[in-house]
Amino acid sequence: MLLLDAFSPAPRTVRMYLAEKGLTIPMRQVDVFAGENRLPPYLAHNPAGQTPALLLDDGRAIAESIAIMEYLEERHPDPPLIGATPEQRAATRQWQRRVELNITENIHNAYHYAEGLPRFRDRIPVAPEAADGLKRVAQDRLAWLDKMLDGRAFIVGDRFTIADIWLYVWLDFADSVGQPFDRGLRSLAPWFARVAARPSAQASLHPACKPGGIRG
């Protein structure tokens, strides 16, 4: 296998997952800042032009971070980061979807339309007028999530899962691009600090990360 990696939040979620699992997969860097992911030969592997992508030994490719982590989890189930039972896996998927659809997709698109606009305006359809609204929705949904996390060590109760990885990486990225979350949220703030203290959080940062720069 070969992981087509990049300096970006979605690939970082896979790197953090690998660090938590103690797995090592050969990686090749894709320069997303130069738009390499939008050109051949990358598009031959992933026509969607997004990173990361996992190349299998038979030549097939798996794209989308969550799909990659799901695939690796089936091959390497221990320690479980999705769940050890059908019920645990369903709960993890439920919470990851809540986080992604309500929060991180809004952060992601707001970045495309505001802070990242100079980079993305010629690559994808953009709607600068939507950026402020998306940011407000993300902040509202973080407050919504904060209430549901009351008394929990992690998003899925006492289990650290890919739902924690997903939200942590995107909130760390958001902090670095001018979209910080409210540190007064009584459950979310300590949760964030708890995850940030895990060795995988620092280990997953891309080597190109600079102090004060984008974290991905």
Image (tube, rainbow, N blue to C red):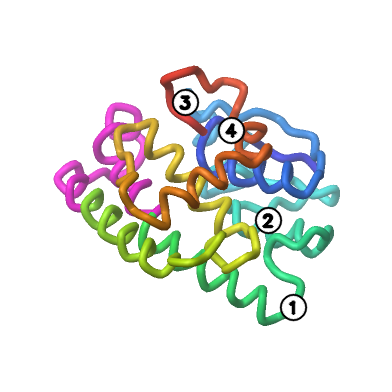
Q: Closest to the observer: 75 or 168?
A: 168
Q: Residue at x 62, y 32 (%)?
A: 202
Classify 10 Å Cα crowding around label 3: few (below 14), some (14-19), many (20 and above). few
Q: Check the image and report above or below for 29 versus 99.
A: above
Q: Considering only order in the chain, which callout, 1 or 2, is on the residue closer to the N terminus?
A: 2
Q: Nearer the viewer, mark 2 or mark 4?
A: 2
Q: Check the image and name the residue furthest to the left.
A: 129
Q: Closest to the observer: 61 or 149?
A: 149
Q: Residue at x 45, y 65 (%)?
A: 149
Q: Amino acid at mark 2?
A: Met
- Which residue is denoted by mark 3 in the rendering? 33
Q: Considering only order in the chain, which callout, 1 or 3, is on the residue closer to the N terminus?
A: 3
Helix, strand or loop under label 2: helix
Q: Residue 23: give x, y in percent of width and height.
A: 81, 44
- Which residue is denoted by mark 4 in the rendering? 6
Quadrant where the N terminus is found in the figure:
top right
- Which residue is denoted by mark 2 in the rendering? 69
Residue 189 appears left or right of 51: left
Q: Amino acid at mark 1?
A: Thr
